[in-house]
Image (cartoon, rainbow, N blue to C red):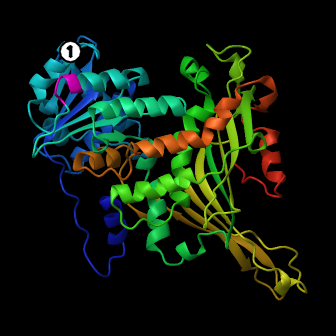
Amino acid sequence: MENIIASAVSQVGDTGHETAPRRSPPGSFVIFGGGGDLTRRLLLPAIYNLACAGLLDDGFSVVAVDRAELTDEQLQRNVRAALEDFAARRGAEAVTLREDVWTWMKPRIRYVRGDFETMQTYQDIAAVVGDQNCIFYLAVAARFFGPIVDRLGEAGLVREGRHTFRRVIVEKPFGNDLSSAVALNERLLRTLTEQQIYRIDHYLGKETVQNILALRFSNGFFEPLWNRQNIDHVQITAAETVGVEQRAKFYEGTGALRDMVPNHVMQLLAMTAMEAPISFDADAVRNEKTKVLDAIHPLSPQDVVRGQYAPGVVNGKEVPGYRQEPGVDPHSLTETYMAMKFQIDNWRWAGVPFYVRTGKRLAARKTEIAIHFKSAPYALFRDTPVDKLAPNIMVIHIQPTEGVTMQFSAKIPGPSVRLGGVRMKFDYAEWFSEGPSTGYETLIYDCMIGDATLFQRADNIEAGWRAVQPVLDWGQDARSLDFYAAGSEGPEAADALLARDHRHWLKIG
């Protein structure tokens, strides 16, 4: 977290100089599932970017662990191909792979072949990493999380020394309901301490998500307004244009609720609604996030909309409905869309609804947080041509573009008093010269230096599941599913959810 604040403060420019982030400690980055898609597309490019930035110690190495028959040389060729693909697929930002960085990385890439549940694999890992610092990244299916950590413990690979650390990064999904999340936490904590576990959510690697805290707590004109006296409601949107793609088997047993809400959406809600921590120490920040999630009022059926996409048109192309996708049950009741109304029972937010929606095959790819402020009194304008005041909205854009937009009223030039809604926009890409990233760079680097601020603690995970568990308990039936055309804004029932409160969603497309 320290690099986030340092970066934000360094832009002021008048009073000091930016301090370069320190290099990571020496050690091995061990990737279980080292031959998989996540490693190839995101983890290795993120490590390459950290190397380009000079943030990796000369004693750093990557150890890929997987079942395939590979030599170190074959793995190194595969890694180079993945990095060349990453550099080339950046569109207008396409670059050539830096040969000096690759020359540095290549001899630091090793391969260990083995089954994740066989002790010989862990003995082979121990022979490679020795007694140095280690980060074990579980880029594997969730069913392997427990067994891998059990074997790491049995092999003595997570035993820390006086001057060495051993940490484990766990990918989502972290459980599929409250009871399974609690059980997984209990299993991991039999082998590891909480300080050794880094539960990763790649959304928190996005600069704009991190900037929520900087915006709120480093600007004196935001925080005084950030409460029920001034905010009417909050909308959180995580919309995708893609369908289920090749993930039908996974998605049929998961759905939009489990896939997005307890993790990504709850993290956005918590960072928006949390109280100011006493410091940017990891536990101070995570304490406040957990308090927000614990304060969420229990959901009722009228607060929830479950949807599923039907055939439609996305980006000018006809696409099938979810039930027509390969591998999907033609009578599936799995939701591909969720809209929910959360109420937070605390002093700051009592009476302010937080509306969230997430879904596939929607009108546009967009993740954003929209803060809707209360309207100013109209009385001043009653004898003017102004018939209504434009709403004041602050939108924090997270993807595909990153930035902040402020919407407010201004007088239209002319002899009479007429008001128009105007927008003022801050765009990260235009203001800061940042290179292409995967979103994992900050998270990997923070784990290396021992900063857990952007990672979820056990109670964070369980509080997120607790908030949505009532929906899972209600179960699935045809009556609770609303259909929407692919390429649309979502089901009509989601519009009705806000209309009952005399509000409406911002447009997605």
Tell which of 474 and 82 is nearer to you: 474
Q: Nearer the viewer, residue 23 or 417?
A: 23
Towards the viewer: 442 or 352:
352
Counting from the top left corner in percent of width and height, residue 231 is at 67, 68
> Quadrant where the N terminus lies?
bottom left
Q: Is residue 453 left or right of residue 478?
A: left
Find numbered disc 1 in the image and state the secondary structure of the residue it sits on: helix
Q: Residue under label 1, please give it.
A: 119
Evaluate whether residue 429 shows in this view: no
Please say if 294 is above or below 196.
below
Going by the image, does 474 lie left or right of 113?
Answer: right
Left or right relative to 425: residue 455: left
Q: Disc 1 marks which amino acid?
A: Met
What residue sits 74% from the left and 52% below the top? Answer: 505
Instruction: Kindly identify the residue that appears in the image at 27 percent across and 47 percent down.
Output: 445
Q: Which corner quadrant of the image does residue 492 belong to?
A: top right
Is residue 479 shown in magenta? no
**Quadrant hosting residue 165:** top left
- As for residue 156 lying within the magenta part, the answer is yes
Give the number of marks.
1
Residue 464 position, x and y percent, is 54, 43
Label 1 packing within 10 angstroms: few (<14), some (14-19), many (20+): some
Give me the residue at 35% from left, 24% from top.
Answer: 146
Residue 225 seen in render: yes
Locate residue 36: give its quadrant: top left
Q: Residue furthest bottom?
A: 415
Magenta residues span 153-157
